[in-house]
Amino acid sequence: MSGMKQYETVIGLEVHVELATKTKIFCGCSTAFGGAPNTHTCPVCTGMPGSLPVLNKQVVNYAIAVGLATNCDITRKCKFDRKNYFYPDNPQNYQISQLYYPICRNGHVDITVNGSQKSVGIHEIHMEEDAGKLIHDNWLDASLVDYNRSGVPLIEIVSEPDMRSSEEVIAYLEKLRTTIQYLGASDCKLQEGSMRADVNLSVREVGAKQFGTRTEMKNINSFKAIAHAIAGETQRQIELLEDGKKVIQETRRWDDNKGASFPMRSKEDAKDYRYFPEPDLPPIVISQEWIDRIKSREPEFKEEKQARYQKEFGLTEYDADILTDSRKIAETFEKAAAICGNPKKTANWLMDDTMRLLKDHSMDPEDIRFSPEHLAALVKLTDSNTINSSVAAEVFEKIFTDDIDPDKYVEEHGLKQVNDAGALEETIRGIVAANPQSVADYKAGKKKAIGFLVGQTMKAMKGKANPGMVNQILTRLLEE
């Protein structure tokens, strides 16, 4: 009878991260995303005979920074190797990577899942170049290749097989992503391919010492798809074992639309790639001074920021967690709060309205265009009662889309709240006189009738009256 056995899933990840350098790893071509096909290319990154690579030092700086932030040992003398394979998007017919002496080793990151902490080991991090991109053209019935991405610097972060669920995998990826974004080493946008995860997964009976046979699923480009892929592949492997069949070690492609994985190729071994030391690049000698210099530039990371926001600004754990999720939001928050002196209100604008508008415009927090100064000015305008909350919401939308100066905008559009009791009273007396029915209803005990009169007043004042003051004056006139 099947289903008696209990299985556990064992997962390790290989995460490729495109580094945020302006130029490629071995040449001076631009790394900008997009661009017409083959416009960011030169003889080096298109693999022309006789062209020679020159290492971009910033790549090494970023790799060391990520290694230190993930508690790795930095390999003081590391070098590059050639990984030979023949594929049209691989212009030299080899990829320059690191096999024997990767730049970082033996690290770990701590994650929290359902309230419990866990350490995920990092086997190594190595530097390598990205390949080009094959574009399949159905019209021409042909495949074309774009080498713009070829030679874009990558680090590959190889975890130990320490994760046991998709929750742990997502927590690990989120931890890596925020850490790397805080370092400024990459924007880690999954949808643009600047962070890609390969999932190595096997299942085994609970209590077994041996790992099962693993499969690898390549380049899955969203957290949601990764969770689906893990669930789907776990199920597939358990069913094979329950039927007395064997899991084959192979590379599979996850199709998120079909909700299934498909075999791509049998798994190569290191020997299939005929690795040997890259003859065109000298070894990299990393001094202690170099490591110390990078360590001293480390930013305040998410966890530290989160704790400080709770202590310094009295924010809740939840609010501090949301605000520190993105380095851009955290920076905007800190600057704006310092200018306007109202951290709580600043946090609310960022957590509610900003998040909603980002979603509406399908933007990432990193794409925010407005300045902290303008957000702070808006908070000041509401704190001083210069504008009411509905005007503030309208002004904020303008700040979000066009980074307008709220002081100027409110001035030019005459949006200041009318706080002049005399002028308001005059308007309200007119409205009361014009609506005897509502007044009668109110006096007969239908207190809701005041809402209609407030609405009429706001309409007459073009929405710029101070709502509290309108209520006060109306109540007084009606009680007279």
Image (spheres, rainbow, N blue to C red):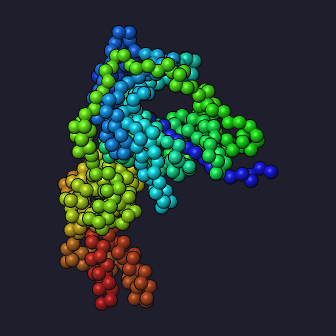
Task: Give me the residue at 31% from left, 40% from top.
Answer: 65
Residue 396 vertical placement versus 44 (above, below): below
Residue in the foreground of this view, choosing between 55 and 360: 55
Q: Farthest residue to the top: give it.
A: 50
Residue 371: percent from left, percent from top: 24, 50
Look at the image and tell me whether residue 309 can be seen: yes
- Looking at the image, residue 158 sits to the left or right of residue 304; the answer is right
- Looking at the image, residue 116 sits to the left or right of residue 183; the answer is right
Residue 35 falls in image quadrant = top left
Residue 195: percent from left, percent from top: 43, 38
Residue in the foreground of this view, choosing between 419 and 72: 72
Residue in the foreground of this view, choosing between 353 and 405: 353
Q: Farthest residue to the front: give it.
A: 209
Look at the image and tell me whether residue 361 can be seen: no
Quarter holding the C terminus is bottom left
Residue 36 vertical placement versus 287 (above, below): above
Task: Give me the residue at 55% from left, 17% from top.
Answer: 142
Residue 197: percent from left, percent from top: 49, 38
Residue 315: percent from left, percent from top: 33, 65
Residue 384 falls in image quadrant = bottom left
Task: Give me the residue at 35% from left, 9% from top.
Answer: 50
Total marks shown come to 0
